[in-house]
Image: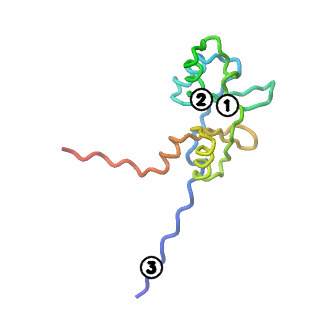
Amino acid sequence: MLTPAPAPEPAPALVRDAMSTVVLTIGPAHTLRQAAALMSARRVGAAVVLDPDAGGIDILTERDILNSVGLGQNPDAEAAHAHTTTSVVFAAPAWTLHEAARAMTHGGFRHLVVLDRGEPAGIVSVRDIIRCWSPARAPEPAL
């Protein structure tokens, strides 16, 4: 009797499979309140801050806004650029989700800006990774 060959291992999921391609971008002069309103309206936890004058790509997260408010700073007076994470770790679309998760764990953050040819192509979050790694949610049994 022939033993069937084992099924091939599925290819690892990639950042491009999990990332959100709709990226909220704001300017460095947006206030924290404006940024929070935009993030809330789009139901996202981070915004990419593009500064054409400085040529940089930063990220502003809900945690950055929370830290500022927790310090008693005025969200109507504080500009986004003063609260961004400037040492951003960027992911590539071809990274595996394991590589992205490792970078997030190592850096202590929950979002990675995904760059493709030097331009923001998306954002991948811890939630995106968990969604890809978790099996489809089975319906609850009827009582």
Crowd tier of the residue under label 3, counting other residues whose Cα lies within 10 Å: few below 14, some 14–19, many 20 or above = few
Q: Is residue 111 above or below residue 84?
A: below
Q: Nearer the viewer, mark 3 or mark 2?
A: 2
In the image, is 54 to the left or to the right of 37?
Answer: right
Compare residues 87 and 58 and report the one nearer the observer.
87
Q: Among all residues in the image, which is located at the extreme bottom? A: 1
Q: Residue at x 59, y 29 (%)?
A: 61
Which numbered circle lies on residue 61? Answer: 2
Q: Residue at x 67, y 31 (%)?
A: 85
Image quadrant assignment for residue 44: top right
Image quadrant assignment for residue 13: bottom right
Q: How is the image coloured?
A: rainbow
Give the image location of residue 129, x and y in percent: 52, 46
Q: Residue at x 56, y 18 (%)?
A: 69
Label 2's element? strand
Q: Are marks 3 and 2 in contact (CB under 8 Å)?
A: no
Q: Are marks 2 and 1 in contact (CB under 8 Å)?
A: yes
**Amino acid residing under circle 1:** Thr
Sequence-first disc among 3 and 1: 3
Image quadrant assignment for residue 75: top right
**Amino acid residing under circle 2:** Thr
Give the image location of residue 119, x and y in percent: 73, 38
* Number of disc labels: 3
Give the image location of residue 104, x and y in percent: 60, 43
Residue that carries the numbered disc 1 in the rendered image: 85
Give the image location of residue 79, x and y in percent: 67, 17
Residue that carries the numbered disc 3 in the rendered image: 4
Marks 3 and 2, how far apart in space? 50 Å
